Amino acid sequence: MDLALDDKVVFVTGASGGIGRAMARAFAQEGARVALHGHRKWDDLVEWVAKQDWNERALPVEADITSASSVAAAFERAREHWGRIDVCVANAGIWPPDDEPLVDLDEDRIRTVFEVNLFGAIWTAKAFLSTLRATGPRPDGHGAALLFTGSTAASFGERGHTDYAASKAGLVGLMRSLKNEIVALDPYARVNIVEPGWTVTEMTRRTVQQPEAAERVVRTMALRQLGRADDVARAAVMLASPAAARHVSGQVLTVAGGMEGRVLWEDGETDGQHVLDRLKQE
């Protein structure tokens, strides 16, 4: 199926992370031109992009995601370079690995998580909408797409990570509001969320790299396997496509193996080592 993303311009924040890089590859493989945002791992991102066979269609852009003016400047650089931006994926986020109940959470950690995960998404959306207003909709009727990377923590909560769960839950209200605002700028523009569950990336690897941890995680999933960054990236590409998802807006697409907020498999029905071995084989 032609996803109609060939030569579209896609801006991905947090492109130096595992899911962000997978998204960059997935969009580039569909023929899109990609503006790839980085900050903390900026040098690594630039080096990685230079090694890709699609690097001539990639523009690394640096910005502090917690600064509205810095994000706006990055979008302006991308617009000046490519002429317009058709798709925006607000993907940048952090997940502090240490379990801490709210009663013990440090104020700085809470504020940092919200500054990156929620306010960073707000500044990204604002910059994208400003760019869309400046360029106007595409003449071919392919509506713009704004996509947020959420988390199942927003739906089920996450003990020891109240800050993260609350910051991701805020994206739902943001998405449902913006789906009604963006059409004033482009009548066929859409806003959605792709919601990963436990996905193995550098950010989460420390938590799920032991068989016992992997077994505990997949007990709440119908599909007893860990997610991969590519799983999330492919879902994002589908939602961004004006062909595959032209009439999909205001939705949360969960990519979590049928996760529920309860245990689906009893002791002995899952094998953590098998889960990890399967991941290595894929």
Image (cartoon, helix red, strand yellow):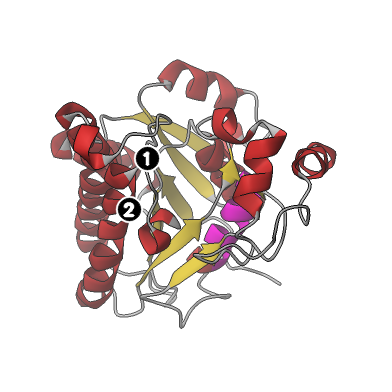
Whether residues under marks 1 and 2 lie with C-beta atoms below 8 angstroms apart, the answer is yes
Residue 162 location, x and y as percent? Answer: 30, 46
Of callouts 1 and 2, which one flags the residue occurring earlier in the amino acid sequence? Answer: 1
Residue underneath mark 2: 168
Q: Secondary structure at mark 2?
A: helix
Q: Main secondary structure of the magenta part?
A: helix
Q: Quadrant where the N terminus lies?
A: bottom right
Left or right: 248 as drawn, with respect to 30: left
Instruction: Name the amino acid, label 2.
Output: Lys
- Relative to 32, residue 65 above or below: above
Rounded to the nearest angstrom, the CA distance separating label 1 from label 2 is 9 Å
Quarter assignment of residue 169: bottom left
Q: Alpha-carbon neighbours of circle 1 within 10 Å: few (<14), some, or many (≥20)?
A: many
Bounds of the magenta segment: 229-238
Q: Alpha-carbon neighbours of circle 2 within 10 Å: few (<14), some, or many (≥20)?
A: many
Residue 43 location, x and y as percent? Answer: 46, 16
Q: Give me the residue at 85% from left, 40% from top.
A: 281
Left or right: 102 as drawn, with respect to 193: left
Pick whichever, 57 or 270, lies toward us: 270
Residue underneath mark 1: 93
Residue 236 location, x and y as percent? Answer: 53, 59
Q: Secondary structure at mark 1?
A: loop
Q: Quadrant where the C terminus lies?
A: top right
